[in-house]
Amino acid sequence: MSKQSRQDGTPDQSRRKALKAGAAIGATVLGAPWVARFAHAQGMDLGAYQSAKINWRQAEGQTVRAAVIPASYFDNLIALAPEFEALTGIKVVFDKVPPGQIRQKAVLDLSSKTGNISTHAGDPMYLPLYAANKWTDPLENYLNDPKLTDKAWFKYDDIFEAWRKADMVDGKTYGIPYDGEMTIQTYRKDLYDAKGLKPADTLDQIVSNAKALHDPDKRMWGFCLRGMPGAGQNMYIYPSLLGAFGGKWFDAGGKIKVNSPEAVAALDWYVTQNNAFAPKAAQNWNWPDIADAFAQGTIASFIDGHSAATVIANPERSKVMGKIGFARWPKGPSGRRVSSIWNWAMPINSALPEKARQATWLFIQWAASEETQARTSFKFKGPGKRYGVNRLSMWKTGPYSKTIGDAGSNFLEASLDSLAQDTDVEWRPRVAQWPAIGETMAKIVQSALVGQVKSKQALDDAQIQVERIMRGG
Amino acid sequence: MVAPGLLVLVATTTFPLLYLLWQSLQNINLAMPGMDRYIGVGNYVRMWEDSRFWGALSYTGIYTGVTVVLQLVIGLGMAMLVLRIPRAQWAFRVAAILPLVLAPVVVGLFWRTLMLTPDFGIVDYASRSLGLGSHNWLGDPELARFSVIAIHTWQWTPFVFLYMLAALAALPEDLYEAAKIDRANAFRRFMHITLPLIRPAIVVVVILRMTVALAAFAAIYAATGGGPGTATEIVNLYAYRVSFAELSLGYGAAVAVVLLAITLAVAAVLFRIRRAT
Amino acid sequence: MSRRSGSALRGAILMAVSAALLLVWILPVLLSVLTSFKDEKEVLAYPPTVVFEATLKNYVAVLAGPSSIVPNLTSSLIIALATTILSIVIAVPAAYAIARLRLPGRQPLGFYVLATQLVPPIGLIIPYFLILNGIGWMDSYKGLVLIYITFSLPFAIWLMVSYFEDIPREMEEAALLDRASRWQAFWYVVLPQARGAIAVTVIFVFLNAWNEFLFAVILGGATVKPVTVAMYNYINTEQTQWAQLCAAALIAMLPVIVLGIVAQKHIVKGLTAGAVKGSGRR
């Protein structure tokens, strides 16, 4: 280089400086967690796990790669991972993937059999796809193997039945629920009390409640449902409405039919009520947006995941603390209430060698065990409340039950009742083609929501596309 | 050093192209593994009859054309404006790169929720305060198409601004002096002196911006996800949806191939123009 | 000297107008800055607040909390630096060769090089996924940098070729007549002049590598986790942490801005047809 350019301070020099600085930071930062983990390992109490009559160390030396979504309930698990490593000698590596991409990443890995992801936070609606392709193992092989699972200790049946069923395909389990949720009615108790309103028991009542409180000029919207298109977004609410109107996904011949009269009625209700009582923005809203709006005090009632409590019952984010009430889904014209069944199901990648799969099972068993569920929720030393612990016993009694009950009036009862009585495993069609069907329906539901097309037309269009998808075209 | 570098480049890019072509001739549906088979041009035939594809294609054309033209006009205009203020130019240059540097994903999200949300966003607040009323910027299909173009233009115009600034700054003074002596007015000076001289730079910038616009993904995905309905679904996004959401890899590959072919054709034309200047 | 004061006034007006336009243009960035100092509750307040109780806790959480993005910044820095350095080192001589040496078939080669850039990213994810897995470079720096280079190399080559073709050859010719080798002519005569173009190329190659998301999320993992993915995770499954997201986004912008400031000095030296006497209106 010429003398002149050296004086000017070329990109080379700044690059070199940046590299040095980066290396220094890198060294500190990479070293810190190791020190922290080491310190943490010293003070661990593994007695609760060691009471299980299995050899936790039978897959020592293996590495489990878990892909999870960013969420406090997984962050807590990641923080607890050193305990698992100390217990089993199995190393766990986590990859935090945004929820919008994790399904794709998992499918890519599973389909090409590259074995990069041992287990992941799986979408139960994808399990039929996994099963059809034999990408993940049926877990009965592991559950029923006394060398791998101490059934009495693990108490698999303590996990919510609805979630266990949702994770089964053709009678075989393909994922173990780690965390989950249900959809329930959420409303501003203070506003309802002021006007003498009761939480809605039927869909008509929720409409009249909304009307009573709807005042957009004062920035108060009566009722809100999410509209964002997506198999896991607006197609998370529409199926509940479909059920409420008595609709079914399959016709008498076992084929998928999406444009039945009940379906049209359900979509009409969705469109009408959201356009009447929800902010316009709701057409593009997902549940965190609704939760944020409710927390700011601009929504009077909504129906969505109970996990919205993370926002609306969080003093750091919510302006409506102590003013929230919860109730089950209102009944539709058919007399049914249908809540969602959602959980993050952890499968085992079939492309791994046997020892690696056993290690993965040990990890899953540990994560879903009562002790770990406790340690990542009420026993956790740090922020991050879990609202979706997977065990019924913990919800019914005990310290967990107490900590989450304070989210609002009737939270515990509404959630438990919903899970016990309002769930329907076939709430969405559990076929391998669900990803495509869900996306197609989602687009069409949103087109109807924004008024691009009428409900009947929308569903007729959807039917044509769904038939093509089911043909495999 | 040149040869091996280029060799690696050619190798790593040729394989994906061939793979893509091969995949586009198959029917691959991850949901129905038993039905994978070679179908020749079946996917392309399907595309011909796919109205959603044509919709995506037409919107892609509009989107790309409008944003590139807007970027050019605004960027060039700003460059010419700023050129006359020599002292503070560095401040403008630094400030201008800020939108460029913000990660597209954050751009999309920010615009979607904090800026454009009706009743809740800042743009909405501003438009109400100015008496323009509230609009559903991302929820109404027509407005959404416009909003998405605006977001992309917002983020990438600074590139044109910087590039044009450098190009204009390099033009020799003497030509302008001569023109001023000839008493040519500003407009004529621009049309007959400036424009021809910077035409090569314009073509370069247009090609670069066009390729980015066609490959735009992160910002639109974060802002509208291709919605409402399929209003803002550019072909790139449609290919993604087909491949990864509908798991129809063969068809998705075919869509990608068609997009590539169109892009190449347009680029070839622009390249010709460049050769000619 | 009425002409002078007239133009001084005009200069002031132009300055004001330009400043106003610029302010409006970077408003979203300014809003990000504002938001990053707000309490989460305050972020979504409507009407949006400009005066509020500022807090640094978002920055503290983003840098020193349990989900600190510092490892991600390091990750991004490694990827972006490696990509940039390798790309420039290969691209600049290659571009010069293509521009000067009249290689046979250089027209189609130039076009092919650009064309490889035009493949839609979507079409590339699966093949690249398979390639990286095949050679065992999945979730590794060398793997991701290799992929990034396939994007930035054509771009860099093409940018530099355009530049080299446009600059006059007199100086090199003079050097060659002085019995310098082609390589010496390149290194000592052409390269210093090309600083502007190289600076622009460096910035944009770095920027593309720094801000890339899709390939990073699919081809990266536990080891390679750049800051774009980490930022996206502030939109977590339960809530969107806007204030922290803004803080993280702003921090992520800093390295590129620093690079931009350092390099922009070189950009002013002219990008096209530079090096003629009397150029520039500085």
Image (cartoon, coloured by chain):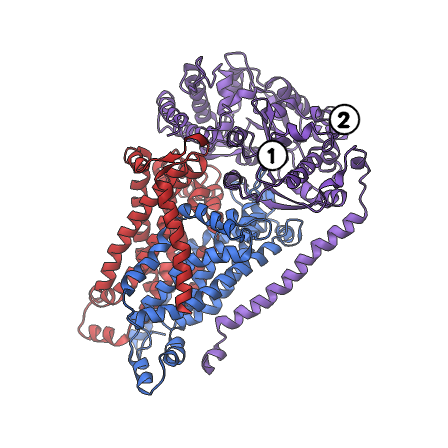
Chain colours: A purple, B red, C blue
- Would residue B41 appear left or right of A78 to someone viewing this image? left
> Disc 2 residue type?
Ala
Image quadrant where residue A229 sits: top left
Tell me if residue A225 can be seen: no
Callout 2: SS = helix
- Asked whether the residues under marks 2 and 1 belong to the same chain, the reply is yes
Circle 1: is it few (<14), some (14-19), or many (20+) Cα within 10 Å? Answer: many
Circle 2: is it few (<14), some (14-19), or many (20+) Cα within 10 Å? Answer: few
- Residue beneath the point at 51% across and 49% down: C133
Foreground of the two, A110 or B208: A110
- Would residue A124 appear left or right of A144 to someone viewing this image? left
Residue furthest to the left in view is B182
Query: What is the CA distance from the residue labelled 2 to the residue labelled 1?
Result: 21 Å
- Would residue A307 appear left or right of A210 to someone viewing this image? right
| Quadrant including the C terminus of chain A | top left
Residue at numbered disc 2: A152
**Image x and y of residue B67, in percent:** 33, 50
Residue at numbered disc 1: A347
